[in-house]
Image: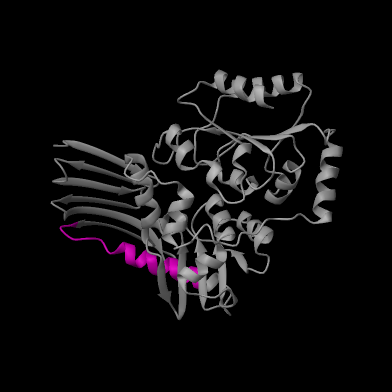
Amino acid sequence: MNIVKFENLRQESKITFLNGLLSLYKFKSILWELKFLKLPILAFYKYHYSNKKYKSILLFSKPKIKKRIEDECLFHIVNQSPQEYDNIVFIRSGLGETYLLNIYLKQILESLNIELKNTCFIGLRDTFKEIFYQYNPDVIYKKIDLNWDYLCLSCDKQKYQYNGKNIYFYIEKNYIYNLMNNYKNSTNNTHFVSNICNFFNINKNSAQIAKYVPTISERDKAITYLYENNININNFIFISKNAISIETFSDGFWNDLEHDLKLKGYDIVYNHHKLSITEAKVIASYSKAIIALRSGFLETLSELDKKFYILNTALTMNNISAEKIKKLYSLKFYPNVKQENIFEYDNETMDENEILLDILKGV
């Protein structure tokens, strides 16, 4: 019998006692619920709705704030979306999943039973528009403003209907949360791309996959950037050392890496916020190799015919181990990738010095 069990995933946490006899659920500072045998005992909530503040304590009754916040989110989604489209696809995932959306766009729309001509895409990031530009420039994408916590609390299904519009969430919360739990507990060891393809009934072998081809202007801009920063276009390494969802490597590792690469005669270009995703990708296409912390941004580079040295660490959101991340999100099994170009490491089965020495032997 589990006396106490702790679960944490993104904004949510749950503590259960005596195999679920008593449970405490918390969603940030918005909602608290105490239950006995799944029956409500005590609840507390506070939130803003229609420009008003709501706060209450409930005894022996379930709070209805999820439905109210759901209505608020759907209202803002419809109100801020281009009005001429009946179907709205809200991207609630990260950059890597948005890359897969673009790669398999035709098949995903078929799975949702909607057509592109009557569909717009929205999200909370400007960077999503760049991915559409690279692979599906005819797509209509708009960044909107919405409370992310309210969205995660209330909208957990794939499809909603509101004011005559069909709203689809890519990828629905329940599926992703369950998948992450199964990854953590090792009840699902299927690669992430295969899971997404299975979810949308995509046949990877028959899917038509586009590749991004930079324009002459984009190539000229990349060459100018390298020239202005005194980078040898024929002998540099592209490095991306930041990621949102996983732990980082130590500063000492990156400092030693830079020092040793320069001793081998390489110039170095770091990815940074001043470069757009497209600019960084075109610049990286001229490099001798790419060394990067595992991230969604890395997936957008994966089709480049370059050597990749990929660093995996534990997933911070629900503590999936680095070794599991390396297997479940291996870049070798992404579309348009040459497996022989991919060299992957994790900081649990190897220490940073061992990884550094192995990379230096390869570049």
Q: Is residue 74 magenta?
A: yes
Could you tell whether 237 is left or right of 164 in the image?
A: right
Residue placed most toward the observer, 91 or 148: 91
Q: Residue at x 49, y 54 (%)?
A: 93
Residue placed most toward the observer, 178 or 57: 178
Residue placed most toward the observer, 153 or 114: 114
Which residues lie in the magenta part? 59-78
| Quadrant assignment for the C terminus | top right
Res 275 visible: no
Quarter location, residue 230: top right
What percent of the width, then of the height, locates residue 290? 67, 36
Residue 1 position (above or below residue 65):
above
Q: Residue at x 31, y 44 (%)?
A: 187
What percent of the width, then of the height, locates residue 114? 50, 75
Q: Residue at x 56, y 74 (%)?
A: 119
Could you tell whether 146 is left or right of 68 in the image?
A: right
Could you tell whether 337 is left or right of 68 in the image?
A: right
Q: Is residue 147 magenta?
A: no
Residue 208 position (above or below residue 339):
below
User: Number of labelled discs?
Assistant: 0
Q: Residue at x 55, y 55 (%)?
A: 100
